[in-house]
Amino acid sequence: MRRRSHLTLLAAVALVLSSCGGESTALTTMPPAEAVLVAAQTPTTTAVPPLPEVPPARSEFEEWDPSVFSNPTRIDNPWMPMTPGTKLVYEGVTNEEGEEIFHEIITIITPLTKVIDGVNTVVLWDRDFSDGNLAETELAFFAQDDDGNVWRMGEHPEEYEDGVLLDAPTWLAGIGGSYAGVAMRANPEPNTSSYSQGLAPSVEFIDRALVSELGLETCTPADCYSDVLLIEEFNVEEPGAFQLKYFAQGVGNVRVDWAGTDTTREELELISVERLSSAEMAEVIAAALELEAHAYEISPTVYGVTEPIAVP
């Protein structure tokens, strides 16, 4: 199962401010930035709910209509807003063969866009560190439809170990039998059907999500949040394993937990939200374009058939 926390680890800085290969070397260095939001509250652990009863899937993949995306790169869904220039840092642990390993994810919402399956998308650059070493760097693509649903349009992840590229399970909607999925519904409500987060059987990405609860409370080093939304992610081929994601309005994903038989047992919390400077964003853009150039080399039949990223 390719459930990854970073694909939905998003925030809108403006709202936060108002409320309170050879690539591996270049892609692992980023200059420090002054944190805009790092609160002093002591983190608290949100109680893990009982395992849900997963209702039958309404459909294997979500109905896709590119004509309902009139302004797809304006992503202002309150549960998953995306403001270019935002950097989010998450820290926690994962379980690897019974050992807890320090885990850090850095997500940056770039000003770059890319057309996928007929729709312009926002480009995210994610880096995933395990015990201080780069484990994955990724370009991820999202768009919002006219009703306010945020769609996951595909990913190009590169997985590393000791600086060596192990795998790059790229999938993009509309190519090779892959379909876009819903990253966040416009109006998420409990007791509704599960939904596909994207379907790419060629790389075993068949994740689904279920809205579990509203009105929760949780604290992280970044802040304390009320009226929190809990979404449970799962894979029908791994019954009983769930990844739990907690979302705060105007911020996005603030905590990740697990339940059931999920062997990874990933636990993450939002550490900081930062607004990058123009100089820092220039470095981010250069790194993202370098990663795309590598994607064209190693994924010629999927990424290689797309138009290049557009630079503003």
Image (cartoon, rainbow, N blue to C red):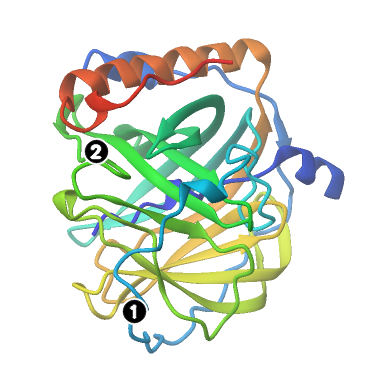
Give 203 or 99, whichever is nearer the viewer: 203
| Amino acid at the residue labelled 1 | Ala
Q: Is residue 177 above or below residue 229?
A: above
Task: Look at mark 1 in the image and give the residue it sits on.
Answer: 57
Quadrant of residue 302 within the rendered picture: top left
Which quadrant, please, contains the N terminus? bottom left
Which tag, 2 or 1, sits closer to the chain's start? 1
Q: Which mark is residue 247?
A: none
Q: Is residue 312 above or below residue 252?
A: above
- Give me the C-alpha separation between circle 2 and circle 1: 25 Å
Residue at 64% of width from left, 68% of height from top? 187
Q: Is residue 281 above or below residue 130?
A: above
Tag count in the figure?
2
The spot of residue 223 in percent (x, y) is 71, 54
Which quadrant, please, contains the C terminus? top right
The spot of residue 85 in percent (x, y) is 63, 27
Residue at 72% of width from left, 53% of height from top? 250
Residue at 50% of width from left, 16% of height from top? 285
Quadrant of residue 95 within the rendered picture: bottom left
Give 255 or 190, whichever is nearer the viewer: 190
The spot of residue 283 in percent (x, y) is 51, 13
| Amino acid at the residue labelled 2 | Thr
Q: Is residue 133 left or right of residue 50?
A: left
Check disc 1 and report its element: helix, strand or loop.
Answer: loop
Task: Look at mark 2 in the image and give the residue it sits on.
Answer: 170
Residue 130 seen anywhere in this rendered image of the structure: no
Residue 156 seen anywhere in this rendered image of the structure: yes
